[in-house]
Amino acid sequence: MSLELYNTMGRSMQKFTPRTPGKVGFYGCGPTVYNYAHIGNLRAFVFQDTLARSLRFLGYEVTHVMNVTDIGHLTGDNDDGEDKMVNQAREKGQSVLEVAEFYTKAFFDDIDRLNILRPTVMCKATDHVDQMIRLIQRIEANGHTYSAGGNLYFDISTFPGYGALANFNPDDLKAGTRVDIDENKRNPFDFVLWFTKSKFENQALVWDSPWGRGYPGWHIECSAMSMEYLGEQFDIHTGGIDHIQIHHTNEIAQSEGATGKKWVNYWLHNEFLVMDKGKMSKSSGEFLTLQYLIDKGFDPLDYRFFLLGGHYRSQLTFSWESMESARNSRRSLVQRLARITENAEAVPESLPANSPANEWIDRFRADIEQDLSTPRALSQLQGLIRDTDVPPAEALAAVARMDQVLGLDLIESAASLVASSKETGDIDDGRIDALIAERTDAKKAKNFSRADEIRNQLKESGIILEDTASGTTWRRSIGEK
């Protein structure tokens, strides 16, 4: 088999063929650093990480580029609304760059805790304004722009393929479309490449340009920075589905308007994380951060496990019940691996050709090659761990291979659990089950002092009991982060 990806451009599964054999260049839209990332935002970055890990697992050399939007970003993608960066700076009594630096660090802290590998290149918009200006000059030279009201606009009528990614024809949508957002636009879908007449007085960050002192439109930064590090044509561009209609559609128009050739071969978009009330949004002021999950007693890798349990193109509903389920499943997985670790001899660097673990890896690879199906890949991991025909050391070697994609630190967590268990005094599963049965009998006999005594005894040995409607379950508290 070979890797197949769902390409938003064309809305179909397509065989992946890189521009350069054995190498992949991909660009992923990064954070706008005016606030903490919420857990819905973080789904996009776990997806990007899973893509990068999967490509490396399949043998590709990967160059992953991600931007940091620290210039500012209007509330609406359509050049309307207030400037988020300026708003936050005003509220905090800080400069825009101070706000950006604070939230950039917070973003890095979050992705590190989620075990997201740092992209090959992290590039800040403020460091690449010269590249943006040069790219706009090329667009202008090719006849795709007009000036109005002091700003420079991209004229979509000069780009026949506009709207192909979003699967719409702008001519079909003109009737009834709001045009009062920006009276300078000839077409409501035209967009700003360079502002010199900002609606905001004393705009925080401005630069000299051929069109006057001002600042770039939001869309141009991704085109300029991706080309700077990946060239004028590259393999994959990722982002959330909310980027399809405007941001990515405009990126294509300006990029191909500058170069005159196809820009990106594969467009991959992750779905939303939703709450009971709908999509999580910063603008509403109601959103959950990773730190909030940690404060509620969850490990960041519980959240990563939760995300991997859903396909990246499927909408995923967040609830505390689903998080508890993910936490319990990950703990159970680590506990089973700890028991395998205790029985394993030296883990081989590579598996013998006749190892039964190879069949599980092959099935895991096949699932990853089908548009990164992490739910099915997790099922293969679970099957491997339960397969008693696989020698313990070979099982651990196979798990380590799979975890190169999953990023759950499974081997390290299991080893930590084993080490901690030895430090606190071993108690085997049979003894635990016997004590739980005795505790159940004691509760039925209303001997609550004995029931509490058993709970405390187990707790001292690192065993935590959880009473549920279906009975008492247990887990080892040691080894958890």
Image (tube, rainbow, N blue to C red):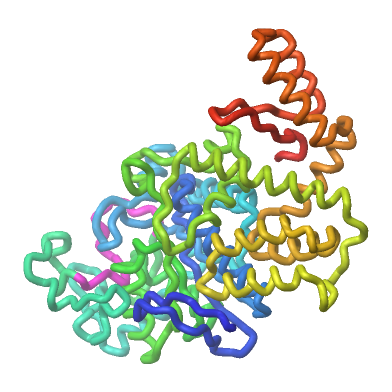
Residue furthest to the left in view is 175
Quick one: 192 or 245, which is closer to the camera?
245
* Residue 478 found in image quarter: top right
- Name the side, left or right, on which 356 lies relative to 39: right
Q: Give the vertical position of 431 relative to 440 (above or below).
A: below
In the rendered image, residue 335 lying in the magenta stretch gets the answer no
- Name the side, left or right, on which 433 lies relative to 467: right
* Residue 25 found in image quarter: bottom right
The residue at 49%/57% (across/down) is 310
x and y percentages locating residue 116 in the rendered image: 62, 57
The residue at 35%/41% (across/down) is 276
Q: Quadrant of the C terminus?
A: top right
Total number of numbered discs in the rendering: 0
Q: Give the vertical position of 443 relative to 430 (above or below).
A: above
Quick one: 345 or 75, which is closer to the camera?
345
Q: Which residues are magenta?
A: 189-205
- Name the side, left or right, on which 253 lies relative to 233: left
Q: Quadrant of the N terminus?
A: bottom right
Quick one: 390 or 423, which is closer to the camera?
390
Q: Residue 120: in sight, yes or no?
A: no
By secondary structure, the bulk of the magenta-drawn segment is best described as: loop
x and y percentages locating residue 180 in the rendered image: 11, 60
x and y percentages locating residue 42 in the rendered image: 50, 53
Q: Residue 370: in sight, yes or no?
A: yes
- Name the side, left or right, on which 435 lies relative to 110: right
The residue at 43%/37% (across/down) is 92
x and y percentages locating residue 161 in the rendered image: 27, 85
